[in-house]
């Protein structure tokens, strides 16, 4: 019996780069396709699947980044079936593992899981069969050797007897490979860091000859680097031109053309917000399955309740978050699958590994903690390749609210800024914005350009259109004449003056506090904490300091403040009090460049100009296109546009 590692190098002559994606003549080529059809009923590989399978069959270390729903599972399940030995799959959540096991068993594949939640007998049986495999004692009638074994990282850390069993499998040459699903959880630089994943560094140390495969849907350059280092993998090499040593890297464009992204303005009043959401769902997705992601546990409960009430039970909702009891989660999953619950209102606890293909819409009631997070969460829509909507309700204040939530997270703040940049942008195509999450789609290839002697020419994988506009996101569909570029230098100068004065006086202002103050509201006073002497109100003479107030409306100034934060004219500062965290707005790194100028300078000097781009009408939901399409059989230009995006099976990327 050959383990994956023993087969190393069989692919091609050593001095020529191996192109796992295109080279033909791998000895296992026919068998792969045959099994794929026979076991999984799939006719053709998609994206980089074939290359990854080949590299897996060749016993390589692999990092594979493919969009959600792209079909990452197949890339190890197929090789696991074909090769000898058992493939061990590490996956973050039991629900995700259960899903996989169900699918595999349906396909007649021998797969087991080992988790804390399962019945004792079941566990013993799985362990027994693995032991038989390790001891070479599987009789002729037990041809059903386990090909795949799933477990969570905790299991590895906490279960010594299991670790011992893995050791036995290893020593007997029955350990085909380790697969780490959702591998971005390894890095604290990623958006979903999990401590237990860090333990996985032992894999290479303890089982040096076993190939490791890391899978993820989002793995930005720094996360990738971190992951490779933590796992102790050799340097990354291109899967389409690999040497004999490195970690073979594959990626597919993250862009999925069946997902239609749009950002809508979120009203300040929650009642209005709920009504908007109900109207949206009833108008566009009355009978569809969807997810509404919420900021907090409490919020997800309120939203679920409101959607139900305001729609008079026409929207059948359920709630999912970390505090929901396990049994309830289970029944929610069931209800969601059978359609008695259509819309799950949830925190991000819901999702990782949801395998429901027909999620027609994902609504974000608030922005995500990072752009990666948003990509992942919204990516749970349309996994079946059919047209689906990803809607984000955005208001600037949510940005600062979030900052307090991630105060203790590594890089928490800069991740939120990436999300805010996305949300504030009314021009750039969403697809192009997402492309920054994937090193292969980002020229210059940031990750690779930093590491030496790597010529990653695999950008053939991402089709050449990767950086062309998608043509169907909100920004692509926005009429040019609705976009206005405004010179806001004077307003910015006033705002920075105000922020600087407050700061010098030892005062603190929140986003909305600063907005009000600059607009001459709140009696023109701000609060200064005097320690033991309590709080004192300080007056601000806007007329004298900057010749009058800022004359734009509340919502616009809040957008401007966020944009000024992004441009580093302002900054956020987090304060923890006994009761809660508060986020204050303070002058940023670049504030001095403007503040020291006089008003006259500002008005006459064109050298330092601050511009704000606003989309007129962006504050109202745009007239929907889909319903028009569905109702209007005669068709419209919008219809044609959307039709192109309407991917059939396997095309919807
Ligand atoms: P992810 O990359 O998110 O882990 P999965 O592996 O769960 O995606 O696959 C998503 C869906 O796509 C599954 O239902 C799977 O059966 C299907 N699938 C995978 N590969 C193919 C393919 N080559 N052609 C058609 N369907 C596929
Ligand atoms: Mg998956």
Image (cartoon, rainbow, N blue to C red):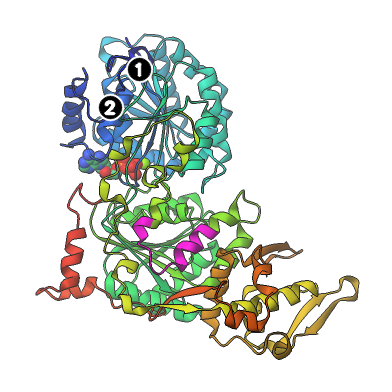
Residue 430 lies in magenta, yes or no?
Answer: yes
Residue at the location (36% across, 9% down)?
Answer: 137
The mark closer to the camera, 1 or 2, is 2
Describe the element under mark 2 as helix, strand or loop: loop
Residue 441 visible somewhere in the drawing: yes
Q: Residue 440 appears in which quarter of the rendering?
A: top left
Q: Position of residue 31 (x, y in %)?
A: 18, 22
Check disc 2: other Cα within 10 Å, few if <14, some if 14-19, many if 20+.
Answer: many
Task: Give above or below for 496 relative to 115.
Answer: below
Figure quarter occupied by ligand 2: top left
Q: Residue 111 appears in which quarter of the rendering?
A: top left
Residue at the location (15% across, 67% down)?
Answer: 640
The yes-or-no answer for disc 2 within 8 Å of ligand 1 is no
Checking the image for residue 20, the label placed there is: 2
Q: Are marks 1 and 2 in contact (CB under 8 Å)?
A: no
Task: Give above or below for 617 relative to 414.
Answer: below
Q: Bounds of the magenta span?
A: 417-432
Task: Give above or below for 354 relative to 397.
Answer: above
Checking the image for residue 4, the label placed there is: 1
Q: Residue 60 appears in which quarter of the rendering?
A: top left
């Amino acid at each position: 019996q050959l383990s994956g590692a023993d087969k190393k190098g069989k692919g091609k002559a050593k001095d020529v780069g191996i192109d796992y994606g295109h080279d033909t003549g791998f000895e296992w080529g026919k068998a792969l396709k045959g099994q794929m059809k026979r076991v999984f009923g799939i006719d053709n590989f998609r994206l980089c699947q074939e290359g990854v399978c080949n590299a897996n069959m060749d016993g390589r270390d692999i990092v594979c980044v493919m969009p959600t729903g792209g079909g990452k599972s197949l890339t190890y399940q197929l090789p696991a079936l074909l090769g000898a030995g058992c493939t061990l799959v590490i996956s973050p959540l039991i629900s995700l593992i259960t899903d996989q096991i169900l699918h595999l068993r349906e396909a007649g594949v021998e797969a087991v899981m080992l988790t804390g939640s399962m019945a004792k007998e079941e566990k013993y049986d799985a362990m027994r069969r693995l032991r038989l495999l390790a001891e070479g004692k599987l009789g002729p009638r037990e041809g059903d050797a386990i090909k795949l074994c799933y477990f969570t990282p905790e299991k590895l850390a906490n279960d010594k007897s299991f670790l011992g069993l893995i050791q036995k499998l290893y020593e007997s040459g029955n350990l085909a490979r380790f697969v780490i699903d959702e591998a971005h959880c390894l890095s604290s630089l990623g958006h979903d860091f999990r401590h237990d994943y860090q333990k996985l560094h032992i894999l290479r140390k303890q089982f040096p000859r076993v190939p490791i495969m890391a899978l993820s849907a989002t793995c930005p350059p720094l996360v990738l680097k971190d992951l490779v280092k933590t796992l102790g993998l050799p340097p990354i090499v291109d899967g389409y031109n690999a040497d004999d040593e490195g970690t073979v890297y594959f990626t597919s464009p993250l862009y999925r053309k069946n997902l239609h992204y749009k950002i809508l303005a979120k009203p300040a009043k929650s009642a209005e917000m709920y009504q908007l959401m109900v109207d949206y769902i009833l108008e566009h997705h009355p009978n569809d399955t969807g997810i509404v992601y919420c900021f907090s546990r409490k919020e997800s409960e309120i939203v679920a309740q409101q959607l139900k009430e305001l729609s008079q039970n026409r929207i059948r909702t359920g709630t999912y978050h970390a505090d929901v009891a396990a049994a309830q989660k289970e029944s929610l999953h069931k209800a969601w699958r059978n359609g008695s619950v259509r819309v799950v209102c949830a925190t991000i606890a819901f999702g990782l590994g949801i395998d429901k293909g027909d999620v027609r819409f994902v609504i974000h009631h608030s922005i995500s903690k990072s752009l990666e997070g948003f990509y992942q969460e919204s990516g749970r829509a349309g996994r079946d390749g059919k047209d689906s909507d990803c809607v984000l309700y955005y208001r600037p204040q949510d940005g600062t609210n979030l900052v307090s939530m991630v105060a203790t997270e590594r890089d928490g703040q800069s991740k939120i800024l990436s999300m805010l940049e996305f949300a504030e942008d009314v021009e750039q195509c969403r697809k192009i914005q997402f492309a920054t999450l994937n090193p292969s789609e980002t020229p210059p290839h940031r990750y690779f350009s930093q590491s030496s002697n790597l010529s990653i020419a695999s950008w053939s994988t991402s089709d050449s259109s990767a950086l062309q506009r998608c043509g169907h996101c909100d920004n692509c569909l926005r009429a040019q004449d609705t976009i206005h570029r405004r010179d806001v230098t004077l307003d910015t100068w006033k705002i920075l003056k105000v922020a600087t004065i407050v700061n010098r006086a030892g005062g603190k202002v929140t986003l909305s506090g600063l907005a009000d103050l600059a607009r001459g509201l709140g009696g023109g006073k701000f609060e200064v904490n005097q320690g033991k002497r309590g709080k004192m109100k300080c007056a601000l003479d806007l007329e004298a300091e900057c010749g009058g107030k800022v004359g734009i409306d509340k919502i616009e100034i809040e957008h401007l403040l966020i944009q000024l934060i992004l441009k580093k004219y302002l900054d956020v500062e987090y304060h923890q009090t006994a009761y809660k965290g508060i986020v204050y707005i303070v002058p940023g790194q670049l504030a001095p460049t403007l503040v020291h100028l006089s008003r006259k300078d500002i008005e006459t000097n064109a050298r330092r100009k601050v511009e704000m781009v606003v989309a007129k009408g962006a504050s109202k939901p745009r007239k929907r296109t889909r319903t028009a399409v569905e109702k209007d059989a005669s068709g419209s230009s919008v219809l044609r546009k959307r039709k192109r995006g309407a991917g059939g099976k396997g095309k919807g990327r």
